[in-house]
Structures are given as C-alpha cells and as structure tokens.
Image (cartoon, helix red, strand yellow):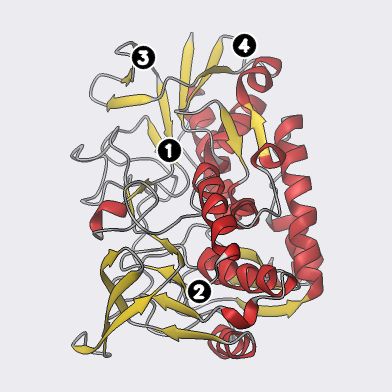
Amino acid sequence: MTTIVVLGAGVGGISAAYELRQVRKPGEEILVISDRPTFDFTPSNPWVAVGWREPRQIRVELAPLFARFGIGFTDKGARRVHPDRNVVELADGSTVTYDYLVVATGPRLAFDEVPGLGPHGGFTTSVCTTDHARMAFERWKDFVEKPGPVVVGAVQGASCFGPAYEFAFIMDADLRRRKIRHRVPMTLVTSEPYIGHLGLGGVGDSKGMLESELRQHHIDWITNARVERVEPGVMHVVEVDASGREKARHELPFAFSMMLPAFKGVEAVFGIEGLVNPRGFVIVDDYQRNPTYRNVFATGVCVAIPPVEATPVPTGAPKTGYMIETMSHAAALNIRALIDGREPHARPTWNAICLADMGDDGIAFVAIPQIPPRNVNWMKKGKWVHLAKVAFEKYFLRKVRSGTIETFYEKRTLQLLGIEKLAS
C-alpha cells in the first residue's frame, strides 16, 4: 500500500487532499494530519473580528467530511517530520510512516519577534486565524463602548499585507455604521516602502488607488515602518528612509490595534537541513518537490518564495488562494506521476488574484505572474467586489463540503473580472 500524508488542513492542505483523492488508485491511502479539528475560511476572519460573521459560519468539521470521501484524518498535530526516515512524529508521541509527504502547514506566526505584539501575552490583536479573530471581536466590543485611536498594519518581515488594508477599511465601515467614526483617529503602519506595494512591487495603480482610499476614509499612514515594541496603549515605531536610515520615531497611542506579524516555518519542519530555508519555509523546485528529499512536496504559505524586491524594511511575497491551489494541483499530479514510474511534469501557476473587501465596496487585483514583469497588472474598485467576496465565501465553503477539486479562485474570478482571455 502507498501512503500519502498531507500535513495541514488549510486551503493548501484540503486542496491537496482533494486533488490526491481525484488521482489515487486502489491500494493508495491518503492521510491528513492537522493540529485542529476544523477547516476555517481564513479570508473571512476580518469580518469575524468586527462581528459581521461568527466562527461557526466559516468553519467545517473535518473528521466526518474526510470520512465521507475515504480520506484518513487526525487532529493530533505533528511534532516533528523526519524526512530521512519517511516518518511524521505526532504530538502524542505516535508516528506515521509515509511514502510521499505534502507539507501544507501554513506558517508559524512570529509574534515573538516584536516585544508586546500579538493576542497571546501581547497588546495587539490578529486576524491570522479564526480563533484570533474571535478574540479580536471580544476586544472590539469593549473598544466601541469606549472608542479611541486605532493602529492597524503589518510589521517588518510580514508578507501578507492585503488583510491589513482590508481590516482598516472594514473597521472604518463598522465605526461609521455605529456613528462613532469621528471619535476614532486611525493610522496604518506598514513595512512596505509605499502604500500599495503589497509585497508585490505594486499591482497596477495600487499606490495611487490605495492612497486615495486612505485619504477619503481619513486614515493616516506610516510606510517603511519598523515596529520596535508595543506597550499597553502605545506602539513604538521607527520610520526609515529609502536607504534604511532612521528618519523619525513615532509613539502611537492606541485603544485598539491589529498588526499582522512576520511568518516563519512551523516547529515540525524548522531547522531541517535541506528541507527548509533559515526561516523554516520549505524549499521546492519547479514541480513543488523538495530537491533534497525527493518524495516530499509542499504547498501554500509554508513554501519558500523570495521577496519580489529588496525593500528598506524587510517585506515578503504573499501567497494568495489561487497560487496555493495551483501548487496543490501540481503536487498531486507529480506524486501520481512518481507512483506510476514517470517524472514530474506539472508546474504551478504563480498568479496573484485577490478580492479585498472594504466594508461597503472593495478592490480586486490581478498580477499574472505574481513576480514582475507581468502579462496582467490590473486593479479595480467597486461595490461588486464586496458582493463577489461574499459570494466566494459561500462558493468556497460549498466546494469544501462537497469535496470538489475545481480551483476555487482563478477561473471564476477571471470570468467575473472579464479578463479571462487576456490572462490565458
């Protein structure tokens, strides 16, 4: 019997499991290892953080779902991967042996790299996980009873900037609905060299468009920002110039703050020579396969992708939903090829396609490929983006529950944006 283990059950993991299910043959077993019993639709977390969604609305129980599709599952979590022995050690001390491994763990949230950052022992909130977003909502409920300054953004080393902008605009919309926006000064703090960089070197006129939106929503900003530390009610920020030299220091008071952290690789793979880079992200070739351990593949945020460009304050490149799905698709096809005695051939399409909600409307951007120069470099705003993101949430969760492997993002999004032929 051939055993394929998928480590993680987020967008990358569940996509990989469904792709593998589609191509598996009799006598082949798929086992998903996760550290939690549910799949959560992470893009909806900003809505959870202001009470526009409840966690149960974006959450799917995995054990009965996978049982229905003949996929093994455990939520014990992985303590350590031993790629030299083809073994995954679980958190309870038991072990699982694999023939092929797909690492889809997502990241470890490196709150510890900035003193006082994060929801666990720190003074800021997070929307990186649904549980974090639920905790943020508890603070939000207290905040709206006694409003004050807000600081929102992404610290040095962050690679996922979209949710910072998205949450800033969602907070703005929620405060306006409560008729207390005039009592809340808001500042966006970001390690990006300019507004709209997004870890992508900009997309279309993202700089001009997002600067205009921030002005219209009365949100100040600080770019090239390094968060030095966070204390109760105060964030200490160093702003640098284009050469990385200190330009100004800011002590920003806040009554509520949400800051995205930098990412690292999870402990289960961190420090394994040949498997991961110094930050713990899994090294892959053009076929999503690790060049040292040839039966190990990776998909999602845990994959090592270099920054698009050097920036005065470190930034990383984001991994959006469609990119992750194409990684999973390629990994599954290439595992199938290896089992059948053929060489890997499938390559992922590293395109960035994103719908960012702004509460009342939204912004869509498409970067094809993600790393410049691009064939498509496109960004648009409209009420339709807000409606499209709501529709995608329902569509995505329905696909998860139905076990469908059709890519959730690109085909439908490009059709919606009317640029499918241009992107092909």
Q: Do the residues under discs 1 and 2 have CB atoms within 8 angstroms?
A: no
Quarter assignment of residue 218: bottom right
Q: Tell me where residue 345 appears, x and y as whole percent.
A: 50, 43
Tell me the residue at 69%/19% (across/down). 69
Tell me the residue at 71%/54% (across/down). 52
Q: Can residue 163 be seen in this view?
A: yes
Which part of the image, by quadrant, shows the C terminus?
bottom right
Whichever of callouts 4 and 1 sits on the residue coming sooner in the sequence is: 4
Q: 224 and 251: which one is in front? A: 251
Tell me the residue at 18%/88% (across/down). 245
| Crowding at mark 2 (Cα within 10 Å: few <14, some 14-19, many 20+) | some
Whichever of callouts 3 and 4 sits on the residue coming sooner in the sequence is: 4
Whichever of callouts 3 and 2 sits on the residue coming sooner in the sequence is: 3
The local secondary structure at tag 2 comes to loop
Q: Closer to us: mark 3 or mark 4?
A: 3
Mark linked to residue 97? 3
Q: Tell me where residue 172 appears, x and y as whole percent.
A: 63, 74
Quarter assignment of residue 271: top left
Whichever of callouts 4 and 2 sits on the residue coming sooner in the sequence is: 4
The local secondary structure at tag 4 comes to loop
